[in-house]
Structures are given as C-alpha cells and as structure tokens.
Image (cartoon, coloured by chain):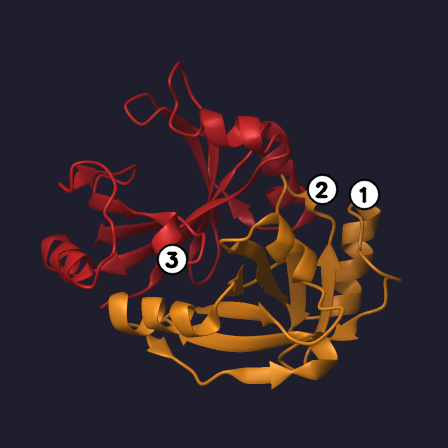
Chain colours: A red, B orange
Amino acid sequence: MIGRLNHVAIVVPDLDAAVKQYRDVLGADVSSPLDLPDHGVTTVFVNLPNTKIELLLPFGENSPIAKFLENNPSGGMHHVCYEVDDILVARDKLIAEGARVLGNGEPKTGAHGKPVLFLHPKDFSGTLVEIEQV
Amino acid sequence: MIGRLNHVAIVVPDLDAAVKQYRDVLGADVSSPLDLPDHGVTTVFVNLPNTKIELLLPFGENSPIAKFLENNPSGGMHHVCYEVDDILVARDKLIAEGARVLGNGEPKTGAHGKPVLFLHPKDFSGTLVEIEQV
C-alpha cells in the first residue's frame, strides 16, 4: 500500500543552525524557510536525490510541535511520511487492520497542500507515521 | 556532499510485531530477518520504491541499541543514513566544518558491508547521522 518515503521530518530548536548543518556541513541543497501559520510550523526542505528531509521549527502559539521540542530540547526526528495513492482507501485499510488514525479520522490538508493523516506511534513501534496522498 | 537517503533506522521492541505493522498493515515489501552478531542487531528491511526503512532489534549482549530501547521502550527512530561517494573525504570535510565524528574517527564496516561513520547528534539538531560510502 505505501509507496515512496516522501520525507523525514526533524524538529529543530534553531532553524538557522540547522540550515548551516545541512547546507554547509553536509553540503546538501536546502530551500528557503517557509512560514506555515495554519500548520504552526516554519519549514525548510533538504532536497536529496531520492527524498526530502523536512526541518521544522515551531511557529506562533500552539504549534503542534512545541511539546515535542520541550521534551527534546536539542531537536530530533519527529515523523516519517509515506505516500499513498488514495488516502481514504488507505485509511479504511489501516483501520480494518487495527491501526489508530489520529484526530477525527478525516484527512487534513498537510504542509504540502495534499491530503494527509497521522497514525498513532504506538501502532508503529514508537514512530509517528504520516500518510500523504500524492 | 551527501547524496541519497540510504535508510531510516527504527529500533523496535518486537520484530515480529514490527514486520506485521509494515507488511500487513502498511502493505510494504519486507525482507526476512537477518542476525548480525558482529553489529549486535537483527535487521529487517522495508523496501520502499525510493529508499529503505531498517527495523532494528538488539541481538545478544552489549547491543549498541540496547540503551536506546531502554530509554524508548516502545521503540523509535534511531538514525538516518546518507550516502557519500568517499567516506574519508566526507569525514575530513565534516571535521573541518566542526562536526564531531563518533568513535576513533576511522570508518567501520556497517551492517551493509560498506564503510560507515556516525556523527554526533548534538551537531545535527538532535539526530544521529550515519554516512555510508556506496
């Protein structure tokens, strides 16, 4: 069912520092920061030949990643995102297999403008999984 | 400098359960388990179209991931691995840029039989980074 790994999201405490780590130290292609007030994050993409790393900094009040950063003040890997062809078909199969979909079970528009859902980390060996319809 | 994302490594407390999560629930192509006594892990690969997820279970005494599992009993994302063309050139550039290479600085043979090095998570926003010469 799942297809490509769309991205790995890493929450960072300092976006400028993270950009330097990926652009200058690791020598990767790094995008400009983009504020996404509706999602409560500022994003920077690290464009690798086969996938992306998404660097995330909390934006504004009530950012969904603020708590993660409190618990992980140095930052850390936050979630992996897998691509699916049809998010409703994927959701129904996941629920039928016993996986828990976070929120109200209806896809939301993710940071890339595509329908997304998040799955409970306890059902995936402690890893927060996002699925995105591409 | 870095190229493809070679894999994302996820430490799991129960490999059979993790295989079911990835093969049966997420519908991915999953390899058979492989014990790597020299590395202190048992691995299962989730083969995605563009990269791999590496599921890791501690193997034997003194597994290098035993402590991680103690701290994260549900499991969790452990490291990301980026490909490089020449690991010694990469290492020297990383050190010149101020990044800390773990261990004695000499590449070891990784779980895939290729030369690898690990970089200090504090220098990469809380993320353990492996580089692998491919």
| Disc 1 and disc 2 in contact, CB within 8 angstroms | yes
Q: Quadrant of residue B67?
A: bottom right
Disc 1 and disc 3 on one polypeptide chain: no
In percent of the image, x 66 and y 69: which residue is there?
B132
Q: Nearer the viewer, mark 1 or mark 2?
A: 2
Give the structural element (helix, strand or loop) at label 1. Answer: loop
Q: Nearer the viewer, mark 1 or mark 3?
A: 3
Q: CA distance from mark 1 to mark 2?
A: 8 Å
| Disc 1 and disc 3 in contact, CB within 8 angstroms | no
Type of amino acid at the residue the image marks with label 1 = Gly
Q: Which residue is mark 3?
A: A124
Q: Is residue A60 above or below residue B65?
A: above
B37 left or right of B43?
A: right
Disc 1 and disc 2 on one polypeptide chain: yes
Chain on which label 3 sits? A
Chain on which label 2 sits? B
Front in this rendered view, residue B118 or A89: A89
In percent of the image, x 74 and y 68: which residue is there?
B87
Q: Residues within 10 Å of mark 3 (few under 14, many from 20)?
A: many
- Quadrant of the drawing holding the N terminus of chain A: bottom left
Q: Name the disc covering residue B98, or none.
A: 1
Type of amino acid at the residue the image marks with label 3 = Phe
Q: Nearer the viewer, mark 2 or mark 3?
A: 3
Kindly give the residue lying farthest to the top in the view shown.
A61
- In the rendered image, residue A11, in percent from the top left (x then y), is placed at 51, 36
Type of amino acid at the residue the image marks with label 2 = Asp
Q: Residues within 10 Å of mark 2 (few under 14, many from 20)?
A: some
- In the rendered image, residue B16, in percent from the top left (x then y), is placed at 42, 74
Q: CA distance from mark 1 to mark 3?
A: 35 Å
- In the rendered image, residue A109, in percent from the top left (x then y), is placed at 20, 37
